[in-house]
Image (cartoon, rainbow, N blue to C red):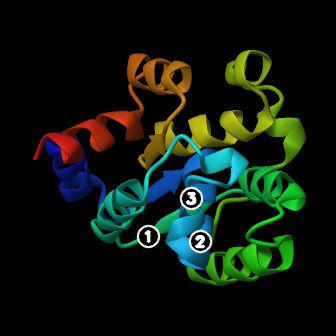
Amino acid sequence: MNELLSLSQSHKKQGIVVDTNILLLLIVGLTDVNCITSFKRTAQFTNEDYYVLQNALSLFDVHLVTPHILSEASNLMGHSASPPPPVLRANLRQIIFQCKEFVRESAVLAQRREFLQFGIADAGIAELATGGAVVLTDDSQLYHYLSGVGGSAVNFNHLRTYAKDL
């Protein structure tokens, strides 16, 4: 948590971008925190993790998304029985209106070195990270990569562990 606090002070205005799984945690938590453990894509998280995420996001003035992250999240929620996809998408809509969307042409992102290793959504995330935004992810490979190339990244699993130890 100290790492995130420090980054939030120096990157508060540049913002924070959440990776797809973390965005899904936010969406499902906004819908019904009791569904977090039963929704396939958030089953690894707990109700407490949703509150840890809310606290983390509150440290930043700007919340960033990309069209690719939004598409991934929208597609992954499409097969949910509970909560139903229209309810999840209503909360995704709410998030979209509250966030700043970073748009970069796919052809530009496909030229980034991260594209071949991680895919188009993470290439966009890498561009944001190298541009000053903080990335919150549960993807340890992406986290280590971004940290290694000088991007600001926080592994959500570290935040979870820290919160449980308090």
> What residue is at 18 percent from the left and 52 percent from the top?
5
Quadrant hosting residue 71: bottom right
Residue name at image x 70 percent, y 74 percent: 92
Question: What amino acid does circle 2 point to?
Answer: Lys
Q: What element carries label 3?
A: loop
Determine whether label 2 and label 1 are within 8 Å by CB: yes
For the residue pair 109 and 24, the one nearer the viewer reads as: 24
Q: How far apart, in angstroms, are the residues tagged by discs 3 and 1? A: 25 Å
Q: Where is residue 12 in the image (x, y as percent from the top left)?
A: 30, 63
Query: Which residue is the site of mark 3?
Result: 36
Question: Is 116 left, or right, of 123 in this rendering?
Answer: right
Tell whether label 1 touches label 3 (CB within 8 Å). Answer: no
Q: How many marks?
A: 3
Which badge, 2 or 3, is on the more N-terminal residue? 3
The answer to which of 105 and 74 lies nearer the viewer is 74
Q: What residue type is labelled 1?
A: Val
Q: Distance between the residues labelled 2 and 3?
A: 25 Å
- Nearer mark to the viewer, of 3 and 1: 3
| Percent coordinates x, y for residue 152 in the rendering | 37, 37
Q: Earlier in the sequence, mark 2 or mark 1?
A: 1
Left or right of 145, for residue 166: left
Closest to the observer: 136 or 12? Answer: 136
| Mark positioned earlier in the residue sequence (3 or 1) | 3
- Residue for badge 2: 100
Q: What separation in Å lies between label 2 and label 1 (alpha carbons)?
A: 7 Å
What residue is pinned by disc 1? 62
Identify the residue at image location x=32%, y=71%.
Answer: 58
